Image (cartoon, rainbow, N blue to C red):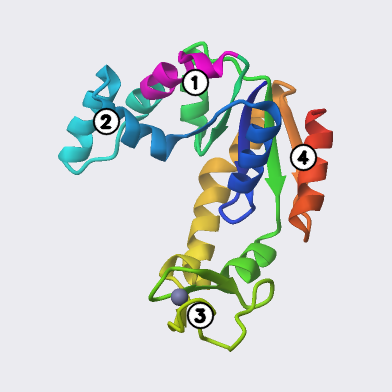
Amino acid sequence: MKLILLGAPGAGKGTQAELICERLNIPTISTGNMIREAMKNGTEMGQKAKSFVDAGNLVPDEVVIGIIKERLAEKDCVNGFILDGFPRTIPQAEALDNMGIDIDTVLSIEVADEKIVKRMSGRRVCEKCGASYHLEYKKPNVEGVCNACGGALVCRKDDAPETVLDRLNVYHEQTEPLKGYYAKTGKLKTVEGQEELSDTTALVFQTLGI
Ligand SMILES: [Zn+2]
């Protein structure tokens, strides 16, 4: 199965990607990791990417897609793959089509903004050891104190409501239009994210027929 996963930041896309990957034994292609890997391995596209990164610029779409193409040609992708984090914009989706990368299904995991903000703003991490907690779902034994090391629990800047809202706005503006793009080709499927992770996973598997 050749799958693209869509979903707002905090909708739980990464976790579902891992579970689908285990179930079907196909790799998750996450662009951030892949670009770092290609640069490290010095592939043709990796070297190109490095020239942009070294100059302090964003890696352009053609290079990212070139790296994806190199990665998809590896033998672990023979039964399919999950693209996580790409495409993020309609021009990227068009570029993917133009490069002949054929996708079977695009699955969008839908979670309301308010729920995402609530979930993410409840996250706390230990300053000392990095252990993670949640004010509602994974409370520490003592408020504000790490169970493991006694360090102070803090809210990361990435999880602060204003940061989360900014990222959600970027998602709605730039990435969400992809749903319309893929709906036109009949490839789009959607799943409502549930309170319980395992309930979302059950719906995801059911929707994908796996
Ligand atoms: Zn700790």
Marker disc for residue 39: 2
**Residue 161, numbered label:** none
Judging by the rendered image, the residue that carries numbered circle 3 is 146
| Mark 3 sits near ligand 1, with its Cβ under 8 Å away | yes
In this view, the residue farthest toward the left is: 55
Quadrant including the N terminus: top right
* Tag 4 and tag 1, C-beta contact below 8 Å: no
Question: Mark on residue 96?
Answer: 1
Closer to the observer: label 3 or label 4?
A: 3
Q: Which of pointers 4 and 1 lies earlier in the amino acid sequence?
A: 1
SS for callout 4: helix
Q: Secondary structure at mark 2?
A: helix
Relative to 121, 36 lies left or right: left
Q: CA distance from mark 3 to mark 2?
A: 37 Å
Of the residues shown, which amino acid type is indicated by label 4?
Answer: Val
Asked whether residue 70 is drawn in magenta, I would say yes
Callouts 3 and 1 close, C-beta under 8 Å: no
Picture coordinates of residue 89, whole percent (x, y): 50, 36
Task: Of the two numbered discs 3 and 1 on the same chain, state the one appearing first in sequence.
Answer: 1
Which label lies toward us, 3 or 1?
3
Tell me which segment is drawn in magenta. 66-78
Could you say which disc has been placed on residue 204 in the image?
Answer: 4
Give left or right: position of 156 versus 26.
Answer: left
Determine the CA span between mark 4 and mark 1.
24 Å
Amino acid type, mark 3: Cys
Instruction: Report the Cα–Cα distance between label 1 and label 2.
Output: 21 Å
